[in-house]
Amino acid sequence: MVLLSRLKTSLDALDGMAVLKNCFLDLCSFPEDQRIHAAALMDMWAELYNLDESGMYTLAYLQELSNRNLVDLTLVRKDDQDDTDYCKEHFVMQLRLLRDMTIHQSKQGSIEKRETHCENKWECPPRVAN
């Protein structure tokens, strides 16, 4: 419990940034320990939060979560040198402890009731092999 309370400060630091906090909380909708296609996540955020379709803001949110060490942003090596789909081979993983902390907080009622996209609107994404 001490560890969860200390990790909660990472979530509390997002209190003034509603969209960024919601983007972080959305990651709990995905299966644990699975890579999430960054492009799919960015498309989801653009649709949910009426962000730009070009991806400028969604990429900034993704980078901010990575800068705050709330997610791991990884690149899968590409064989060709085609840079047209910059985020096509980028993946996001939420750290297990942070995911557990967010789920724990939501069960405690300290996070306002949020719609679970996998249960209501969205189908859960397919698992990506590690």
Image (cartoon, helix red, strand yellow):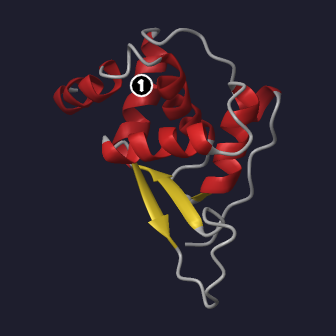
| Image quadrant containing the N terminus | top left
Residue type at mark 1: give it: His
Number of marks in picture:
1
| Image quadrant containing the C terminus | bottom right
Residue depicted at x 47% and y 28%:
103
**Along the line of sight, which residue is nearer the eye, 57 or 74?**
57
Q: Which corner quadrant of the image does residue 87 belong to?
A: bottom right
On the rendered structure, is 42 left or right of 72?
Answer: right
Q: Is residue 4 above or below residue 77?
A: above
On the rendered structure, is 62 left or right of 100?
Answer: right
Q: Is residue 50 visible?
A: yes
Q: Which corner quadrant of the image does residue 119 belong to?
A: top right
On the rendered structure, is 111 left or right of 70?
Answer: right
Residue depicted at x 29% and y 29%:
10
Q: Is residue 39 above or below residue 41?
A: below
Dot 1 falls on a residue whose secondary structure is helix
Residue depicted at x 53% and y 76%:
76
The image position of residue 104, as x and y in percent, is 41, 25
**Along the line of sight, which residue is nearer the eye, 13 or 114?**
13
Residue at numbered disc 1? 104
The image position of residue 121, as x and y in percent, is 82, 29
The image position of residue 124, as x and y in percent, is 75, 45
On the rendered structure, is 73 left or right of 55?
Answer: left
Q: Is residue 56 above or below residue 50?
A: below
Q: Is residue 33 visible?
A: no
